[in-house]
């Protein structure tokens, strides 16, 4: 654009004046009045930039407020270049003003109140600015009271039909962006502008933004993880009420911020009136809080160059429950593994706006324990992100008494700027700060070169006794206990029965030494024995299956830091060594969930379902562990050692110690077989389902579990019916009736199962008799207890089908209507829409009930 060029019908360009976020700004004159105007033209003609430019023009055209730059006109020039005409402003922006020094509290509050008034008007029109910062607040003639909000290039409109930001992409100015904008969330509302206004007010009062660093990744990590210091800690004398109000504006969660710009205006005016009075000379009210934060210990992991992992994280977080979810791709599975890794180590993971990742591990235990967990987490992250550079820093701030997290993040960020060499295999290094390196024990190999400290890996500890002056010591005074343990082991091996021995004593008495000596003696025999050990971790107390996960990882020789494909291959090979078909695949998949090595679930209904139900996943992981343990025990004796059990977890204790009782083990295994058999039944694998149900029945008979044994007859009747062996199906159903005649809650289901088999044989009269009795008992149970324990849908469905087969179509319609109503009432209690759909569509008798309701009653649900 050149001087003298005509723009639109009324303006002529005079000169180039500057540049904004999207385009170049020119000074122009109205051809008739000579009034100056600012004309903004697009610098980047990309499709997204054109959309942003159009959105900015649309937003400004809808806004008329003294503290928002005034819209004049917009259009498209002859060459297709869009333009936007606004009022011309002489003066400087707030950023230039703050470069000369901070504002007085009263002036800062007055300025913020006027900006909030402008935001109130914008938000009222559904306009969210999304880039409030000092450079976008213009001061005409340098007058703070006439401040105007400018540059709406990143504006969000409430009624927009398209999004400007791609998934995982972040737009804005890092030091003034709210956490939800940094992490790339798609739903950004007006409270994002209120957060940014809080950052501006903070900068006006203190001369610096609340979060800033030399590196972008550090700034973003601080916005997400760190807490802003109270302004009074940087500018003494500010009232406590002002500290508290800014803390509300800078809350990490939008719900904790003020509800609207109008509320902010009201609060700022009240604070402005208070600030106009005498200045306070008292110490900052926040000093007590600072003292309470002095000893906070934390580790921060930053990973740069993570590639397109942001899309995977978004996909994993968006995955719908069973029934509507597409299979996860490799990228989403990697993201899922990342989430599991950081959860296992007690960390919080966030994707930052520049594509990097940040994980925070707060110190709940000693600094050494924290550094150990952080190192393991970093090694695993590097294995899942083979192309990323990873930095780990640990620390607290005892000396300067400022923000401890700020310094740790800065140190980690500075490490990423270094040039330390990685491992010999060419993988990017894991960089350490000196404090983390000093805290890591001899179990980690750390390389110390000219380029800095690099974490190489974790060293598997040798199972050896403590040494004195470098020489092994002799175990004395524990012969009785050792003989007892050896005898117990020999008894287990000879009789193929599990036993549990609990060793308790005070700290330092020698429990670990006793364990070491037992293992040494067993190994010295030269007889085959598998020894599995796990240790409770005070940093992960109660983490489900934490100790069992250790055992599986060591048994399969899984290493933190290696690629997930290699871990899957190792785990599958370890399971295949002794676990028989057809259990290998499900055992491997659910053990993979236990050890942070997820497998694709695109053709695994069991895995898909378990990933949507935490309890089901826990049950399946326990089942997988039991199957692995049984297969290993069948191959050779197994010694399971759980140290520091007081720091363990309940699922591990339940799964491991249940093995000490034969009947308890039988029940556990039978339940696992039974569950897998029924899953295979739904998949159509009738022969495998039948074999597993028969095996489950043998376990229940051995355990004397008559009720559970009867349940296997019910399901085997269904297996035989689907397989076409109706005689065997009838025999199973009648046997179930005999076994469960004294178990009233199950009688309706048993009678309905028998009626279903009789219908398949064409014996309508007999089927109706059994089905009618089942429906009568079911209705009585519903009336008295409000529900039927099991098989309710099957009872009403079979009754309706038996009535239809007997020619009573009216009765059949009434029965199916009753079954439909009961079914929908039960489904209504499921809050999750996708789970509710799965319940109605994936359970065979439920789907059949709805299908009959549509066919017989004209239902369209």
Image (spheres, rainbow, N blue to C red):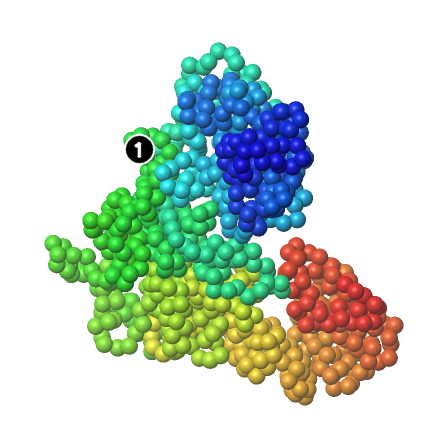
Rendered residue at 22%/69% (across/down)? 521
Q: In this orientation, which residue lies closer to the viewer: 540 or 96?
A: 96
Quarter of the figure with residue 784: bottom right
The quadrant of the image that shows the N terminus is: top right
Quarter of the figure with residue 764: bottom right
Mark 1 Cα within 10 Å, few/some/many (few <14, many 20+)? few
The quadrant of the image that shows the C terminus is: bottom right
Q: In this orientation, which residue lies closer to the viewer: 516 or 296?
A: 296
Rendered residue at 79%/78% (across/down)? 802
Left or right: residue 796 versus residue 445 is right
Residue 755 seen = yes
Residue 258 at what x, y percent from top left? Answer: 58, 32
Rendered residue at 14%/55% (across/down)? 468
Extreme residue in the top direction = 278
Q: Which residue carries the number 1 mark?
A: 398
Residue 211 at what x, y percent from top left? Answer: 42, 35
- Looking at the rendered structure, the secondary structure element under dot 1 is loop
Up/down of 213 relative to 671, above or below: above
Residue 499 seen = no
């Amino acid at each position: 654009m050149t001087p003298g060029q005509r723009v639109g019908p009324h303006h002529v360009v005079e000169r180039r004046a500057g540049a904004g976020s999207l385009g170049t700004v020119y000074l122009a004159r109205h051809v008739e009045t000579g009034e100056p105007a600012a004309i903004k033209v697009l610098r980047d003609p990309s499709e997204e930039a054109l959309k942003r430019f159009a959105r900015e023009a649309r937003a400004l055209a809808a806004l008329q407020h003294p503290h928002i730059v005034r819209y004049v006109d917009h259009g498209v020039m002859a060459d297709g270049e869009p333009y936007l005409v606004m009022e011309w402003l002489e003066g400087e922006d707030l950023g230039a003003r703050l470069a000369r020094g901070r504002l007085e509290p009263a002036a800062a509050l007055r300025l913020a109140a006027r900006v909030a008034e402008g935001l109130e008007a914008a938000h009222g029109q559904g306009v969210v600015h999304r880039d409030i910062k000092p450079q976008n607040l213009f001061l005409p003639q340098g007058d703070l009271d006439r401040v105007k909000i400018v540059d709406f290039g990143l504006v969000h409109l409430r009624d927009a039909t398209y999004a400007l930001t791609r998934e995982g992409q972040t737009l804005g100015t890092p030091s003034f962006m709210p956490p939800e904008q940094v992490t790339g969330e798609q739903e950004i509302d007006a409270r994002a502008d209120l957060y940014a206004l809080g950052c501006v007010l903070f900068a006006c009062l203190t001369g610096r933004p609340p979060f800033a660093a030399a590196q972008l990744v550090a700034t973003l990590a601080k916005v997400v993880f760190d807490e802003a210091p109270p302004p009074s800690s940087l500018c003494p004398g500010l009232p406590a009420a002002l500290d508290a109000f800014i803390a509300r504006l800078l809350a990490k969660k939008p719900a904790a911020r003020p509800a609207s710009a109008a509320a902010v205006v009201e609060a700022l005016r009240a604070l402005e009136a208070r600030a106009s009075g005498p200045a306070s000379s008292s110490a900052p009210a926040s000093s007590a809080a600072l003292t309470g934060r002095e000893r906070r210990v934390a580790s921060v992991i930053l990973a740069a160059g993570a590639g397109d992992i942001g899309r995977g994280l978004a996909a994993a977080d968006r995955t719908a429950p069973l029934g509507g979810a597409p299979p996860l791709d490799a990228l989403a599975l990697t993201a899922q593994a990342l989430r599991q890794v950081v959860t296992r180590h007690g960390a919080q993971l966030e994707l930052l706006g520049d594509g990097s990742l940040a994980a925070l591990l707060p110190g709940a235990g000693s600094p050494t324990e924290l550094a150990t967990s952080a190192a393991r987490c970093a090694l695993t992250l590097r294995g899942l992100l083979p192309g990323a550079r990873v930095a780990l820093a640990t620390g607290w701030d005892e000396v300067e008494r400022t923000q401890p997290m700020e310094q740790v993040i800065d140190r980690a960020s500075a490490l990423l700027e270094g040039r330390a060499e990685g491992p010999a295999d060419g993988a990017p290094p894991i960089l350490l700060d000196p404090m983390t390196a000093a805290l890591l024990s001899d179990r980690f190999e750390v390389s110390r070169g000219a380029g800095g400290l690099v974490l190489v890996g974790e060293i598997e500890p040798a199972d050896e006794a403590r040494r004195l002056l470098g020489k092994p010591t002799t175990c004395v005074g524990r012969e009785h206990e050792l003989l007892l343990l050896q005898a117990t082991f020999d008894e287990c091996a000879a009789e193929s029965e599990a036993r549990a021995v609990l060793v308790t004593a005070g700290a330092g008495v020698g429990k670990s030494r006793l364990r070491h000596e037992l293992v040494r003696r067993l190994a010295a025999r030269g007889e085959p024995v598998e020894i599995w050990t796990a240790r409770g971790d005070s940093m992960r107390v109660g983490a489900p299956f934490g100790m069992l996960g250790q055992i599986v990882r060591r048994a399969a020789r899984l290493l933190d830091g290696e690629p997930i494909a290699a871990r899957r291959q190792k785990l599958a090979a370890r399971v295949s060594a002794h676990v028989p078909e057809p259990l290998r695949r499900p055992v491997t998949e659910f053990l993979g969930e236990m050890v942070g090595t997820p497998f694709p679930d695109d053709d695994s209904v069991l895995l898909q379902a378990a990933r949507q139900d935490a309890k089901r996943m826990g049950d399946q992981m326990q089942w997988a562990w039991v199957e692995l343990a049984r297969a290993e025990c069948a191959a050779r004796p197994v010694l399971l050692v759980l140290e520091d059990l007081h720091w363990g977890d309940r699922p591990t204790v339940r799964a491991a110690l249940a093995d000490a009782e034969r009947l308890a083990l039988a029940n556990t295994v039978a339940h696992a077989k039974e569950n897998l058999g029924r899953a295979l039944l739904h998949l159509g694998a009738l022969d495998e389902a039948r074999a597993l149900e028969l095996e489950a029945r043998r376990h229940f008979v051995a355990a004397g579990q008559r009720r559970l044994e009867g349940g296997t007859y019910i399901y085997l009747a269904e297996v035989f019916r689907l397989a076409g062996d109706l005689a065997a199906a009838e025999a199973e159903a009648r046997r179930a009736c005999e076994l469960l005649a004294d178990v009233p809650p199950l009688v309706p289901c048993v009678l309905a199962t028998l009626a279903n088999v009789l219908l398949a044989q064409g014996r309508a009269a007999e089927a109706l008799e059994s089905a009618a009795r089942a429906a009568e008992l079911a209705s009585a149970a519903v009336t008295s207890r409000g529900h039927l324990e099991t098989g309710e849908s099957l009872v009403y469905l079979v009754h309706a089908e038996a009535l239809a087969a007997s020619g009573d179509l009216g009765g059949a319609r009434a029965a199916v209507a009753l079954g439909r109503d009961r079914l929908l009432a039960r489904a209504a209690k499921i809050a999750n829409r996708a789970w509710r759909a799965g319940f109605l569509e994936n359970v065979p008798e439920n789907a059949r009930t709805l299908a009959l309701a549509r066919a017989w009653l004209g239902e369209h649900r």
